[in-house]
């Protein structure tokens, strides 16, 4: 596989005004994401997981280091899309119009926009929900709309910042499986932030542990379990134990939860 993102010696630090100054959040951070790879990122609060996603997405600057992205550029798509813990749907827009929001500014005619929206709503299992309002949806359905909105722009890389963190356990597991199906069907690269180690291991080809002060990637765990997976299979439970042990060592080094 070829690298879609290559990060070298990345340093992030911000003062009260959001400028790249002050004590580093993380430093000397190196990361490679291969095309089509599903990478999960875990670590203590404050280690800079969300900050890393925002730097990759060009939503905030790094103080030092390089982020090289190998992605197809086109006026009809966006190379990177983000999904957040809250779906952030606009209550005055129906589901279709929320999904279409990211398409604004792209060089697509009305028929192409409608087709994109139809395709991604079908992909996330909401083909019949386009005319509903956000208040008519469950929490899991709202997150599906958020994922559809991200996929509609046809990104090479999907950045996901604890997208299932606010959901109940049953809905969370359902959406984990749905996400894996979507990933398999689309071939997108995914960088997925979570505090849930079981989730990180179940989803990821690799689990990265971000820790230390300033933080850096302290461990990378290859998940040998094949796909499709079962949550109770031996390779998954063993990997969960290894990652939990590594995270405990990070806490012992002085990091917060």
Image (cartoon, helix red, strand yellow):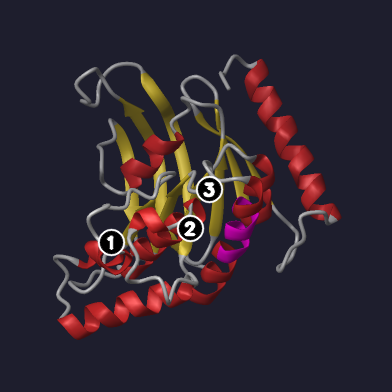
Q: Position of 187 compared to 168: left or right? A: left
Residue under the image location 47 percent in, 59 percent down: 141
Q: Depth-wise, is mark 3 or mark 2 nearer the camera?
A: 3
| Residue 174 counted in the magenta span | yes
The circle on residue 133 is none
- 138 versus 131 height, above or below: above
Q: Position of residue 94 (x, y in %)?
A: 28, 63
Disc on the earlier residue, 3 or 2: 3
Graded by Cα atoms within 10 Å as few (under 14), some (14 to 19) or many (20 or more), the crowding at tag 3 reads many
Asked if residue 99 lies left or right of residue 141, the reply is left
Q: Secondary structure at mark 2?
A: strand
Q: Would you name the residue on which mark 2 appears?
A: 190
From the image, tell me which residue sits under label 3. Answer: 164
Choose the circle earlier in sequence order: 3 or 1. Answer: 1
As displayed, is residue 110 above or below residue 106? below
- Report the magenta residues as a range: 172-178
228, above or below 116, in the image: above
User: Farthest residue toward the top?
Assistant: 254
Q: Which secondary structure, mark 1?
A: helix
Q: Secondary structure at mark 3?
A: loop
Where is mark 1, residue-wise? 98
192 to the left or right of 9: right
């Amino acid at each position: 596989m070829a690298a879609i993102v290559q990060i070298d010696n990345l340093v992030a630090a911000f003062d009260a005004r959001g400028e790249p100054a002050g004590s580093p959040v993380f430093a000397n951070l190196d990361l490679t994401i291969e095309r089509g790879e599903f990478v999960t990122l875990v670590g203590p609060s404050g280690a800079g997981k969300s900050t890393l996603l925002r730097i990759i997405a060009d939503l905030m600057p790094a103080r030092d280091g390089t982020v090289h992205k190998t992605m197809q550029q086109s006026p009809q798509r966006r190379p990177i899309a983000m999904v957040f813990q809250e779906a952030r749907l606009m209550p005055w827009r129906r589901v279709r119009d929320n999904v279409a929001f990211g398409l604004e500014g792209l060089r697509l005619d009305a028929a192409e926009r409608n087709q994109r929206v139809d395709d991604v709503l079908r992909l996330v299992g909401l083909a019949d929900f386009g005319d509903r309002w956000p208040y008519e949806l469950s929490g899991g359905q709202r997150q599906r709309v958020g994922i559809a909105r991200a996929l509609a722009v046809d990104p090479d890389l999907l950045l996901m910042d604890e997208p299932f963190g606010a959901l109940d356990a049953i809905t969370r597991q359902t959406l984990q499986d749905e996400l894996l199906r979507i990933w398999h069907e689309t071939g997108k690269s995914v960088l997925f932030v979570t505090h849930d180690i079981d989730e990180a291991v179940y989803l990821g080809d690799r689990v990265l542990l971000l820790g230390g002060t300033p933080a850096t990637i302290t461990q990378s765990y290859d998940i040998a379990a094949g796909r499709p997976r079962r949550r109770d299979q031996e390779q998954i439970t063993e990997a969960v134990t290894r990652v939990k042990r590594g995270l405990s060592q990070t806490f012992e080094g002085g990091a917060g939860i």
